[in-house]
Amino acid sequence: MSLSEKPGITPEGQSLQNVPSVSSAANHRVSSSEDLDMEANKAAAPPPLTFPEGGLQGWLTVLGGFLTLFCAAGTMQSFGVYENYYTLNTLSDHVPSDIAWIGSLQGFLLFGGGFFSGQLFDKGYFRHLLSGGSFLFVFSSFMLSLAQPHHYYQNFLAQGLGMGIGMGMVFMPSISIASHYFRQKRALAMGIILSGGSLGAAIYPIMLNHLFPKVGFAWAVRAQSFLFLGLLIISNLIMKTRLPAGGKKVIDLKGIVTDVPYMICTIGSFFVFWGLFVPYFYLQLFCSKHDLPPNIVTYGITILNIMGVLGRTLPNFLADIFGSFNVTIATGVLTGALVFMLLASKSVAATVIFAILYGFSSGGFVSVIGPVAATFAKNINEVGTRMGLLTFVSSFAMLTGSPISGALLEAPHYYWVRPVVFSAVVVLFGSGLIIISRAMQARKKGTWRL
């Protein structure tokens, strides 16, 4: 009998028991194919996002955002010094409510532009927004120095429109970029960036109030413009994005605007901002009209804004511990209650106390409301859009709030109780809406820490 004829032996001399069957071999091939597909899917899936929570480039980017807002937001927040100068000097033929439209337009474009610049930031246009907005802001500031007395339209176009558009281009990207480097410390990083606006608003009144009588309006504004130029060059050089852009990924705008808790929070933010900046615009004029000493007239807004630096860092630090929603509500309610103190600020001591307390509480709300909007985002590509939409809606409050207060003030009679009551009521009402939004969001997520 040949080898091939022996039972159980293959022609190659192997036992049949060691040869896999046809079906088992096929199953093995299928299993291998599935394993390969799974490995391919794992390779194709993007790696999970990681955040360094700082690092050299992360903190340099925070510094760059701080410097950018030192120029942009600081200018808008310190408009009170221009309001006072225009009312008493170069635009004395216009009532305070007309002059307030210049600063209000700046605030409107700074906040309202965030809706568009936030979406462009999410799509990867950070560098274009920062460089283009910086150029327009500085150019318009130099143009303001050429404005002639009693030519209202020149101030309006250069300071309100030109500088306002530039502010709107750089504001939201400078805040949103913190989300590329921070997650656990995001509120703190955004607060540090926003505190740049308060520091700028503390320095500019001192600078301008000393320069206006010494070198005149034109050279005082040029000195400020050269400062803008130097600081914005630095910020453009040191700020860098880290995460890939959303690219052509479609943002679910319908899903965002139908998110009921988010929209209630956004409407609440509108009402708070409707009254929040009234003291910023009118504190110096209030002090002037109540014959307070020149030093408190000059430094009242400075004290208010220097406390805003602390107000935009400490509450954000607490927000990372206790939740952004909780801190926002606390600062909003406190801000609304403190507005009434302005009526009692007819002495140096009372004005200083008001400026300290109001600067801290209002600065806290402004800095923490952005991280609150970011908590609604379903992914990192929604952060800029969510924050931008909230600031866009709030920008209409910025546009109309101070002029309404100026009209209620009714110069030359100056009925101060009217704008104060208006400001306090709308701030407290907006804080109430944010409380409702927080309750709905807490029920949805099942946690108190929001």
Image: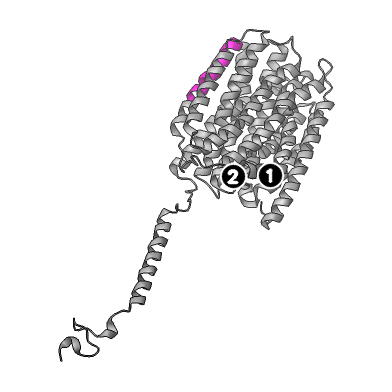
The stretch drawn in magenta includes residue 183: no
Residue 148 visible in the shown view: yes
Residue at image position (68%, 44%) is: 258
Pick the front one: 72 or 379: 379
Q: Give the quadrant of residue 402.
A: top right
Give residue 60's mark. Answer: none
Give residue 187's mark. Answer: 2
Mark 1 falls on what kind of element? loop
Pick out the residue farthest to the bottom: 1
Type of secondary structure dominating the magenta stretch: helix
Q: Position of residue 349 (x, y in %)?
A: 75, 30
**Residue type pointed to by label 1:** Thr
Residue at image position (51%, 37%) is: 123
Q: Quadrant of the N terminus?
A: bottom left
**Residue type pointed to by label 2:** Ala
Q: Position of residue 282 (x, y in %)?
A: 74, 24
Q: Position of residue 300 (x, y in %)?
A: 70, 26
Q: Which residue is mark 1?
A: 258
